Amino acid sequence: MINSINNNDVGLVQGNWHYPNPETNAGFHPSTRYPEYPFAEISTEDNSAYDSVRQLFHQLGLDAEHYGTPQWNPLSELIQPNDNVVLKPNFVRHHHRLGKPIECVITHGSIIRAIMDYVWIALQGKGAIIVADAPQGDTNFNKLMVVNGLDTLFEYYQKKRTETLSIELRDLRKEWTVYRHGGVIWERIKLQGDPDGYITVPLDQDSEYASVKNKNYYGADYDRDKTRQFHNEKQNRYNIARTILNSDVFISIPKLKVHRKVGVTLNIKNLIGINGEKNYLPHFTVGSPDKGGDEFSNDTFNNKIDRKLKDFLLWKHHSWGKYAYVGWHAIDKFILRRFQSKQNFVKGDWWGNDTTWRSALDLTKVVLYADKNGVMQETPQRRYFSIIDGIIGGEGEGPLTPDPINSGLIIGGANPLLVDIAATTVIGIDWQKVKMFTSAFVLSKYKIHNNDTNRIKWHSNIPDYQGNAPLMLFRPPSGWLNHVELDKNSLAE
C-alpha cells in the first residue's frame, strides 16, 4: 500500500458548488465555522468549494470517529507532525487563450485553501506546507497568482508561519519562455527555479521509453538535442525538482479536464509538473505513423515542410530564423491547410500519440518510488493522496483551451491510477481506450496498482452510485472524437 488509507477507496461527491470570488473573499475563508476549523476568519460569502473538500473527506470515512467534533483530523492517517507536505496543483497557465473562464484550466485556489487547512490541522504546528508546480513555459506566474487568488491566499497563510511550521509557494521552472506570433518562442527568461535544486533520476531500462524503436523525440520546444540527451538508446532520465523528492507526503490536486495528447489530464498527467525542464520531456515522436512517428495523423507535404523549417529556422538558426518562420507559418495556416482534403492533427494532438503518456507514467513511478537522493527503491518512498478539482471541468480542446463544464465534482483517493480511472469513467470516457491507463496495469516494475478496477470501493454522496455509469459526458478533444468515448450500449444500460 502507498499509505495507510485504503488503496482501493475512491471518494466522489457532487453538488451545486461554486468557487468563491478572490476579490470578495480574499484568502477563500470558509463560510461555516466548522467544529474543527483552526482559524478565526469566516467569510460572509458562501464558500461551497470549501464544503466540497470537507464532504469528500467525510465520505471516505477519514477519522470517522471524530467527525463533527473539534478533534476531527481527516488527514491524520496520511500526515504526521514534522512531515514535509507538498501540494501539487495543475497550474498549467495564467489565462485561457480564447478568453474563456480560467476556472476550467487550472486548479482553483479555493480548493487549495481547504486542503491546506486540513494539512495544517494534521501537522499540529510542526512541519512544512509547500504548494509547488512547474507550469507551462510561457506562464506568467505572478499573473497566475492574481487570477487564481493565490496572492491573497498566501498573504494570509504567511501570517500563520511559525518557527516550527513553514509555508511556501514555489514555481519549479528553470526558465520562462515568451511566445509571440502564433506560438513561436521569442525570448527566454531565467528563473530562480526550485530553491532546493534539481536531481537527475535515471529510469533507463525501467522507463516506458526503453522498448521504443524510434527515438526521434520532440520535447517542449525546438532544440531536439536536449530531449535526446535525456532519452536515447542508452538512457531515459528526468530532471526532477528536489522539492518533490524531499516530501514525506505528496498531495496531487489536478483539474478534471480532457487533454489533446493523452486523452485526459488527471493525476498521472499532472505529474509532468514535477520536472524542472520541459524540453527534457518527449511530447511526440517526429514524423508520420508509417515511419514510426506520431507528430501528425496524416502525412502531408506541408507537414514535411513545416518540420524541416522548424528544425532549420527555429532550432539551428533561431536568432534570425524565427522571423522567417512566422511568414511561413502564416502561409501554412491561412492558405495551404485550407486545401487539405482530410482532417489532419499535428503536434501529437490526437489519439495516435504513443509518446506523451510514457513520460507521465515514468514520472508517477518517480513520485512513488524515488528516494530523496533520486534513487529508485523497491518500496514506495512517500505517502500519496489525490483530490481532483472538478467543480468546473474542462471539455473539448484541453488542456490549454477547453470549454468550461459545470460538473460540480470532487473526486479523491489514495491511488493515482484508480482515482484517474474512476474520474475518466464518470465523465463518459472509456479508460480502456487510454494508453496511459491500460499500460499502467502491465508495469513489470514500480507498479502503481496490482489489482483490477473491480476492486474500487466507491464512497459517494450519490445514493447507490458504484461507478456503473457516467455522471457527465465531457466532449473529448477533436483529435480523440469517436475514439475514446464509452460505448453507446454501455451508456444505455
Image (cartoon, helix red, strand yellow):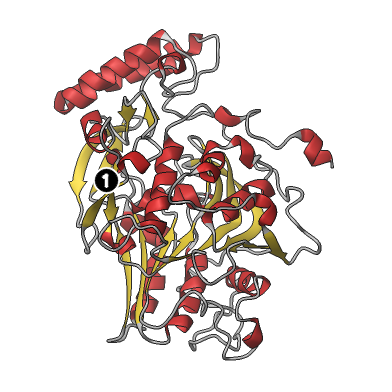
The residue lying at 41 percent from left, 38 percent from top is 208
Residue 202 x %, y %: 28, 47
Residue 57 x %, y %: 61, 72
| Image height of 385 relative to 335, above or below | below
Q: In the rendered image, which residue does mark 1 sit on?
A: 277
Q: In the image, 69: left or right of 349?
A: right
| Image height of 127 relative to 189, above or below | below
The residue lying at 44 percent from left, 60 percent from top is 148
| Image height of 197 relative to 179, above or below | below
Q: In the image, 361: left or right of 37?
A: left
**Please, what secondary structure does the residue beneath circle 1 have?**
loop
Q: In the image, 16: left or right of 104?
A: right
Residue 285, visible in the rendered structure: yes
| Image height of 194 relative to 401, above or below | below
Q: What residue type is labelled 1?
A: Glu
* Residue 370 placement: quadrant: bottom left
Residue 378 x %, y %: 39, 57
Q: Choose between 426 and 321: the one closer to the eye.
A: 426
Q: Choose between 13 and 235: the one closer to the eye.
A: 235
The number of discs equals 1
Q: Choose between 167 and 440: the one closer to the eye.
A: 440
Q: In which quarter of the image is the C terminus?
A: top right
Q: In the image, 290: left or right of 279?
A: right
Residue 471 x %, y %: 73, 51
The residue lying at 26 percent from left, 34 percent from top is 227
As drawn, the residue found furthest toward the bottom would be: 70
As drawn, the residue found furthest toward the right would be: 493
Q: Check disc 1: other Cα within 10 Å, few if <14, some if 14-19, many if 20+.
A: many
Residue 14, visible in the rendered structure: no
